[in-house]
Structures are given as structure tokens and as C-alpha cells.
């Protein structure tokens, strides 16, 4: 089960509403516009519970009644990252994926190099160790990300099955 999805729909809506208030305040502080298009992009991002690419979001929002321009999507994503409502996660191919983080605990990622699956995990010891290292070195952190690249269980099992099949037919 993913770490990201809240079980309660009312809880999810409350987090989204709180995040919207934070985003509106952030936009106004920057003397920028709060627009219907930005609200649509924001809402669509908070409806997602995956690690998406900007192009995936753009494809989704360039059709239907809630159409939004690609430029608005990219600018809104950048603002949401700057406001710490969304964070970027790079895969092993250096593609940028996004996830909304407002209302979610700190978590880390395992990314499968074979199928591209993102697996989220929490480990308070890692977070504590990062803070210890910062304190030891006099470094003031603003956040951290741990991403481990490798092969997921399913891909390893599929690869082993392929080897078994090849050995059996030889």
C-alpha cells in the first residue's frame, strides 16, 4: 500500500484545502496572480497519488473542459516546488518526477531501474542520521532526499524466471 494516500476522503480534502491556502498566500507574497488555471493545475496535482512527470500532467490538462496551457502547467509546478508543496524526484534517467508532499511525512524512495517503479519508505533512523551529520559539520539543512536505485522484487523474480526458462529449454 502506498504511503501517500490518505484513507479518509474528508482528511484528504482538508489537506488539499489547507495546501491551497498556503499556495495562495505564497503566490500573493510573490505579487503574482491567483488564477483559475493555476487552481485547476493545483487541484489536479493534489488528486494524484503517484510520481508523475510534467508531460503526463500536461497531457492530462490539455484536453477537456479544464484545459490549461503547457506554460501555465510548468510555471505552476515550479511555484509549487518553490512553495514546498511539491517536490522533485529524479529517476536514474534524470527524468524529473513530481509528488505533492504537503500533509505527508518525510519519506524516501527506492526506484527500480528495470520497470521504473517508485517504492516509498520511511526510516526515522536515516532522517536522524542526516540531522546528526549536519550538526557535526555545522551545516544547516533545508531538507533531504534519499533515493536508492536498483531492481524491485518483481523484476528480479521475472529475470530469475527467464533464466530458469532458458536453462530448461537448453
Image: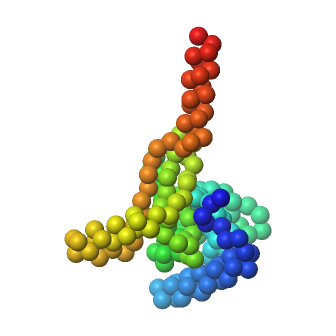
Front-most of residues 77 and 127: 127
Say which quadrant the C terminus sits in: top right
Say which quadrant the N terminus sits in: bottom right
Residue 17, can we see it?
yes
Q: Is residue 10 left or right of residue 50?
A: right
Q: Quadrant of residue 70?
A: bottom right
**Is residue 52 placed above or below 114 in the rendered structure?**
below
Image coordinates for residue 41, horizontal then vertical, percent:
64, 71
Image coordinates for residue 65, horizontal then vertical, percent:
77, 68
Front-most of residues 39 and 130: 130
- Tell me which residue sits at (56%, 42%) in the image: 153
Residue 44, can we see it?
no
- Tell me which residue sits at (63%, 74%) in the image: 42
- Tell me which residue sits at (55%, 53%) in the image: 118
- Tell me which residue sits at (73%, 69%) in the image: 66
Q: Is residue 103 left or right of residue 83?
A: right
Q: Quadrant of residue 72?
A: bottom right
List the single residue furthest toward the front: 125
Image coordinates for residue 32, horizontal then vertical, percent:
52, 84
Applied colour scheme: rainbow
Front-most of residues 71 and 117: 117
List the single residue furthest toward the left: 137
Image coordinates for residue 151, horizontal then vertical, percent:
50, 42
Front-most of residues 122 and 57: 122
List the single residue furthest toward the right: 65
Amino acid at each position: 500500500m502506498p504511503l501517500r494516500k490518505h484513507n479518509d476522503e474528508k482528511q484528504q480534502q482538508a489537506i488539499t484545502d489547507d495546501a491551497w491556502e498556503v499556495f495562495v498566500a505564497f503566490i500573493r507574497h510573490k505579487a503574482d496572480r491567483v488564477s483559475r488555471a493555476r487552481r485547476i493545475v493545483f487541484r489536479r496535482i493534489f488528486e494524484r497519488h503517484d510520481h508523475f512527470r510534467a508531460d503526463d500532467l500536461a497531457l492530462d490538462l490539455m484536453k477537456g473542459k479544464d484545459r490549461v496551457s503547457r506554460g501555465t502547467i510548468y510555471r505552476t509546478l515550479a511555484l509549487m516546488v518553490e512553495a514546498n508543496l511539491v517536490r522533485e524526484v529524479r529517476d536514474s534517467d534524470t527524468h524529473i518526477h513530481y509528488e505533492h508532499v504537503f500533509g505527508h511525512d518525510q519519506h524516501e524512495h527506492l526506484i527500480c531501474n528495470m520497470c521504473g517503479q517508485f517504492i516509498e519508505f520511511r526510516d526515522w533512523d536515516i532522517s536522524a542520521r542526516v540531522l546528526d551529520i549536519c550538526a557535526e559539520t555545522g551545516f544547516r539543512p533545508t531538507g533531504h532526499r534519499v533515493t536508492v536505485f536498483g531492481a524491485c522484487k518483481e523484476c528480479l523474480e521475472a529475470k530469475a524466471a527467464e533464466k530458469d526458462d532458458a536453462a530448461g529449454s537448453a
